[in-house]
């Protein structure tokens, strides 16, 4: 397929309009068809208005806008797209409607025309099952908003030919996107691998680890995520987010790893769908005051402290306090009577008992301890108030706001990132995608600060494995089973990037 090849987009909603816009802007001739009278014309007019705004802002030249507009046209009926080299379907997410459309398209377009679906949830194999030529059926899953989001998942069904997948991949790249190959399994890459970001936050909230606002602050300011899980679920809509989780749970035959949350189900049943309904975890009605994270009050600086060994925490605190780190066989910080250690996945209480440190405070993982504005901690049951105050005071004079979580394994960031890495490793292990593919998909598709397997390399694959072991032992659930691929890498001392 070349830039002169005709592309047809069927469905002129938000996604279809975006796909038509980026293809035409990239030099492709595009026809837009919609079964609803006037819808395609409205979409084309909307794209033209977008290009005019880009010209006004200096983001596009007049000549480029005029040329792109000349390449974008309306098909009044489905037979008018008969010369298309590729048809991208972007209609309502209804299985019967999509299958009926593709059956009809086979009677309209040429035998070598690629049939691509923008579905986010349906099996490409299932969509192609009744086609005469299932080898030309492929998934081309764009993300919303299409003009801004870089990722496209190119999804191979059981019958998809290699040529079809490669041509689709090349087309997405020519249209300015970052395509990744995926096998047609529930959730493809992004919707599957992202599940722990929501699931672990919901479990933490359900178990009283902290408030939704506090967990969001930890995930944003320590974890480096663009949005916290609760504000993100409110933005997506709980009806949508819960539906996707339940769909993936059912598609994997009730696998505990994808178990939906009763908390989220309650919100859906109450009509609290998030921003679109005015209330979700947070209140969006006029005049509502957003809840503040529960930061620890300012404590006095400890009269004395010391830093021992070198890990991400001690090195960063030493730099922030312009102090030094004493080389030792163990890594810890003392502040008054308190001992601070970086989480290894165990609860503070378990670790305090095992290591005979009564006044123990553990610190959650941070994406960058040197710059993080917020750190999460948990205290052992045996930790005295005086010792805890000293630990908090030390982190505060180092320039960190502190949120105290309930003493649960893996705390918030390490727990979540470990589960994301575990799910990503399982997807690679099952042939859904490559290591590079899943890393790119999660960065480009949901704006994670790092790909989950690249992140595991940063933390240490063995540390991720150990955190998962702690979670599995604590809860006794199959939900936290370790991916064979992650286990193999940890045992061999290998990074995923090798």
Image (cartoon, helix red, strand yellow):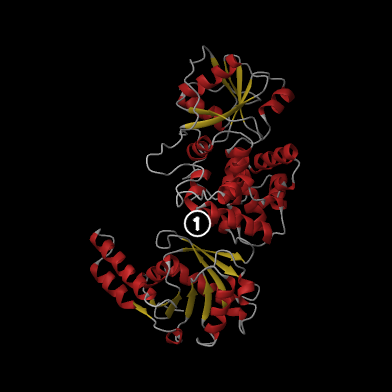
Looking at the image, residue 199 lies above or below residue 252: above
Residue furthest to the front in view is: 270
Looking at the image, residue 192 lies above or below residue 399: below
Q: Name the residue under label 1.
A: 445
- In this figure, what is the number of numbered marks? 1
Horizontal side, residue 319 vs residue 387: left or right:
left
Observer-nearest residue: 11 or 290?
290
Q: How far from the left and from the top, in percent, is residue 90?
A: 48, 71
Observer-nearest residue: 470 or 460?
470
Q: How far from the left and from the top, in percent, is residue 354?
A: 74, 25
Q: How far from the left and from the top, in percent, is residue 180?
A: 54, 63
Assess disc 1: are there few (<14), some (14-19) or many (≥20) residues with their C-alpha within 10 Å of its C-alpha: many
Horizontal side, residue 490 vs residue 271: left or right:
right
- Residue displayed at 60% across by 18% down: 338
Is residue 401 in sight in this rendering? yes
Is residue 157 in sight in this rendering? no
Say which quarter of the image contains residue 254.
Answer: bottom right
Horizontal side, residue 484 vs residue 71: left or right:
right
């Amino acid at each position: 397929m070349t830039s002169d090849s005709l592309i047809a987009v069927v469905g002129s909603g938000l996604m279809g309009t975006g796909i038509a816009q980026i293809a035409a802007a990239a030099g492709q001739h595009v026809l837009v068809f919609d079964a609803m009278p006037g819808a395609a014309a409205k979409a084309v007019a909307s794209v033209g208005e977008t290009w005019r705004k880009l010209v006004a802002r200096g983001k596009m030249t007049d000549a480029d806008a005029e040329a792109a507009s000349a390449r974008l046209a309306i098909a009044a009926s489905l037979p008018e797209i008969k010369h298309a080299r590729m048809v991208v379907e972007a209609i309502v997410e209804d299985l019967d409607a999509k299958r009926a459309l593709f059956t009809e398209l086979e009677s309209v377009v040429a035998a070598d025309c690629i049939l691509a679906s923008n579905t986010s949830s349906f099996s490409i194999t299932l969509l192609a099952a009744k086609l005469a030529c299932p080898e030309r059926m492929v998934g081309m899953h764009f993300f919303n908003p299409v003009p801004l989001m870089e990722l496209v998942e190119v999804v191979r069904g059981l019958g998809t030919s290699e040529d079809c997948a490669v041509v689709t991949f090349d087309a997405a790249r020519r249209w300015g996107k970052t395509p990744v190959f995926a096998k047609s399994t529930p959730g493809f890459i992004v919707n599957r691998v992202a599940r722990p970001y929501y699931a672990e936050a919901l479990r933490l909230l359900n178990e009283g680890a902290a408030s939704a606002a506090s967990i969001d602050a930890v995930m944003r300011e320590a974890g480096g995520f663009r949005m916290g899980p609760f504000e993100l679920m409110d933005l997506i809509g709980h009806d949508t987010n819960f539906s996707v989780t339940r769909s993936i749970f059912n598609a994997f035959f009730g696998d505990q790893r994808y178990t939906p949350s009763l908390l989220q189900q309650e919100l859906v049943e109450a009509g609290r769908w998030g921003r679109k309904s005015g209330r979700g975890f947070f209140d969006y009605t006029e005049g509502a005051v957003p809840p503040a994270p529960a930061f620890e009050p300012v404590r006095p600086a400890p009269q004395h402290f010391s830093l021992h060994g070198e890990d991400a925490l001690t090195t960063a605190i030493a730099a922030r306090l312009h102090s030094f780190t004493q080389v030792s066989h163990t890594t810890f910080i003392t502040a008054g009577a308190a001992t601070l250690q970086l989480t290894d996945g165990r609860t503070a209480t378990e670790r305090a008992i095992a290591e005979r440190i009564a006044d123990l405070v553990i610190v959650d993982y941070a994406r960058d301890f040197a710059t993080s504005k917020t750190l999460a901690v948990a205290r052992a049951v045996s930790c005295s108030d005086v010792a805890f105050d000293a630990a908090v005071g030390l982190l505060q004079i180092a320039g960190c706001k502190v949120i105290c979580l309930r003493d649960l394994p893996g705390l918030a960031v390490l727990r979540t990132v470990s589960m994301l890495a575990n799910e990503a490793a399982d997807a690679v292990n099952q042939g859904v995608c490559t290591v590079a593919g899943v890393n790119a998909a999660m960065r480009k598709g949901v704006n994670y600060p790092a790909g989950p397997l690249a992140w595991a390399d940063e933390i240490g694959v063995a540390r991720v494995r150990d955190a998962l072991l702690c979670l599995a032992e604590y809860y006794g659930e199959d939900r936290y089973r370790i991916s064979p691929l992650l286990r193999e890498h940890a045992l061999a001392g290998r990074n995923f990037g090798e």
